[in-house]
Image (tube, rainbow, N blue to C red):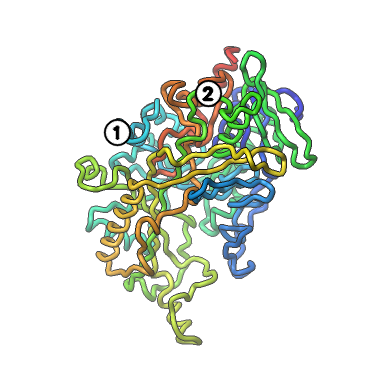
């Protein structure tokens, strides 16, 4: 089939939610047309074993390559030429777009922490935010299926609000490195857990995907399929069914409806020719990313209405959320002068600190209502620019100081829950269009005292841990308002088309189906009703798998 042929389902987006939906639907026998705004991409391009010294600026990030020269991102970033976005006065929000087949799954951290019971019912727990229309128990079996399918290493810790996976689901995690074992000793003394992380990286072979051989940064893309990305798994699997057609360079403008109000497809711009085309399907699935999905819906209003499509609730574009981020670096004399050896490991988290203070929150003993986890980084690694920063001198004495101190620093990175607020949202900027003539998004953003207090709790807790281990904080510890991340910076934005119990308060139902259009579904982070501190990708995939299963059932019954 070609992109001009009608398909059973049109899927917009090829990342976590789009590729999962496409694979589930093609597996069920449906024909699927996948539209991707970026270019074609294969992980065979990944420079997996190149060293920093082989790259310009020793691989340091630049305007074109924000996460380093070897990062898998090909044509995307914070700014995409000809595809702008704007910001409301007084707001600072940055929007990452990958613009490549597979989307962010090609270069994400692969951290895969399940949301727990508290995370699905936050309003019930503390009166803030919005409850999901599903409970953890509704998604638990889909988490199991997703984790086993993609391959997630980790353990069941039994910690509060950090639910366990089913028997045989998780792969064996890599062992703690020296500095992680050192950190765990301090955590144990303070009742701060330092436990094995969960990441979508294989430690044993699954199908054609090989286990990690601990020698390459996951953010570069993984040609052997060990680090999960849709371009080495879900998309190739869907292709093998013979039911998937892919069109890259397809910039979707709007959803098309027939006279009865059902979706018949989407209008997109073929970037290669500049021509406007229509993709036709019995079902339309938007999984373009939180911002892009909101943009498409808001640009789909009849007669150019700013209310958009599937927006009887007025919630499309509202409730924009991102992860709360801040960090502290520390130096530990006990780690000085360690013997040099390869401790690269999985090139990401082997251990992390899950949130541990839920009981104190419940008792009102801390001034933040929601939690965070701490991602920790250390090790020797591949030195880039600035490895000797903070040291004085030159020549052999400077080199000796660098060697002695290298590997003795640990970075503590906060990843916390944001509570939705009325001042964080996106809408169409009617005064600005992209190079295709499509009206662009304008972002408004504001953190609240809840998030600032959370940063304060993180800073105090980590300084206590650092002191316990005899370390010293490197650099200035800024005030929470100065230390907190810019909106969008953590690239976890969710929530612009939230899931809920009815059409008055939400955009989609518990299966991602829009209340207003019976055959229009959303399977990306836009449907999140809350933003737990857990990284969102594994939840996006579990929700997409559940939604696609429902779509497949409805297609078989000819309900749509």
Q: Where is residue 292 shown, x and y percent of the image? A: 59, 38
- Total labels drawn: 2
Give the residue number, with chain letter if any, for mark 2: 514
Give the residue number, with chain letter if any, for mark 1: 127
Q: Where is residue 59 shown, x and y percent of the image? A: 59, 65
- What residue is drawn where x is 45% and y is 34%? 528
Which SS class for mark 2? loop
Please say whether residue 31 is visible from this viewpoint.
no
- What residue is drawn where x is 33% and y is 40%? 162
Q: Residues within 10 Å of mark 1 (few under 14, many from 20)?
A: few
* First in sequence: mark 2 vs mark 1: 1
Q: Nearer the viewer, mark 2 or mark 1?
A: 1
- What residue is drawn where x is 25% and y is 64%? 468
**Closer to us: 53 or 74:** 74
Q: Residues within 10 Å of mark 2 (few under 14, many from 20)?
A: many
Picture quadrant where residue 34 is located: top right
Q: In this rendering, is residue 7 above or below 419?
A: above
């Amino acid at each position: 089939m070609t992109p001009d042929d009608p398909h059973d389902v049109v899927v917009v987006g090829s990342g976590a939610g789009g590729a999962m939906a496409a694979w589930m639907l093609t597996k069920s026998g449906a024909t699927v047309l996948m539209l991707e705004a970026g270019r074609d991409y294969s992980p065979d391009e990944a420079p997996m074993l190149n060293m920093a010294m082989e790259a310009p600026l020793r691989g340091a990030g630049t305007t074109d390559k924000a996460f380093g020269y070897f990062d898998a991102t090909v044509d995307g970033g914070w700014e995409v030429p000809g595809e702008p976005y704007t910001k409301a006065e007084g707001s600072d929000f940055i929007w990452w777009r990958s613009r490549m087949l597979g989307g962010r799954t090609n270069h994400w951290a692969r951290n895969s922490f399940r949301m727990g019971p508290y995370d699905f019912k936050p309003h019930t727990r503390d009166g803030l935010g919005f409850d999901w229309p599903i409970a953890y128990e509704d998604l638990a079996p889909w988490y199991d299926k997703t984790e086993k399918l993609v391959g997630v290493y980790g353990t069941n810790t039994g910690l509060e609000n950090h639910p366990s996976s089913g028997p045989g689901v998780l792969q064996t995690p890599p062992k703690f490195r020296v500095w992680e074992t050192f950190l765990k000793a301090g955590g144990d003394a303070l009742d701060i857990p330092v436990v094995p992380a969960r990441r979508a990286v294989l430690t044993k072979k699954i199908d054609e995907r090989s286990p990690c051989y601990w020698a390459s940064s996951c953010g570069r893309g993984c040609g052997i399929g060990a680090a999960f990305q849709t371009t080495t798994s879900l998309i190739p699997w869907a292709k093998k069914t013979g039911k998937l057609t892919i069109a890259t360079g397809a910039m979707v403008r709007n959803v098309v409806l027939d006279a009865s109000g059902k979706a018949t497809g989407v209008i997109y711009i073929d970037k290669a020719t500049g021509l406007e085309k229509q993709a036709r399907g019995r079902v339309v699935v938007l999984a373009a990313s939180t911002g892009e999905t909101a943009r498409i819906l808001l640009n789909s209003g009849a007669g150019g209405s700013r209310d958009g499509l599937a927006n009887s609730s007025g919630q499309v574009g509202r409730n924009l959320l991102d992860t709360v981020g801040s960090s502290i670096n520390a130096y530990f004399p006990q780690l000085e002068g360690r013997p040099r050896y390869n401790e690269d490991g999985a090139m990401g988290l082997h251990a992390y600190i899950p949130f541990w203070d839920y009981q104190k929150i419940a008792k009102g003993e801390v001034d933040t209502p929601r939690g965070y986890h701490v991602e920790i980084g250390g090790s020797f690694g591949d030195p880039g620019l600035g490895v000797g920063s903070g040291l004085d001198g030159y020549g052999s004495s400077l080199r000796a100081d660098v060697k002695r101190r290298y590997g003795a620093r640990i970075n503590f990175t906060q990843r916390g829950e944001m509570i939705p607020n009325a001042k964080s949202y996106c809408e169409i900027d009617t005064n600005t269009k992209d190079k295709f003539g499509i009206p662009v998004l304008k972002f408004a953003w504001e953190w609240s005292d809840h998030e600032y207090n959370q940063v304060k709790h993180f800073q105090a807790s980590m300084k206590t841990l650092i002191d316990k281990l005899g370390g010293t904080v490197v650099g200035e510890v800024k005030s929470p308002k100065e230390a907190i991340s810019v909106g969008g910076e953590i690239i976890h934005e969710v929530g612009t088309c939230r899931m809920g119990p009815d059409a008055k308060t939400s955009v989609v139902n518990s299966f991602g189906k829009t209340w207003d259009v019976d055959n229009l579904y959303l399977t990306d982070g836009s449907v999140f009703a809350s933003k737990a501190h857990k990284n969102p990708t594994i939840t996006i995939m579990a929700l997409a798998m559940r939604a696609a299963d429902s779509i497949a059932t409805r297609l078989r019954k000819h309900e749509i």
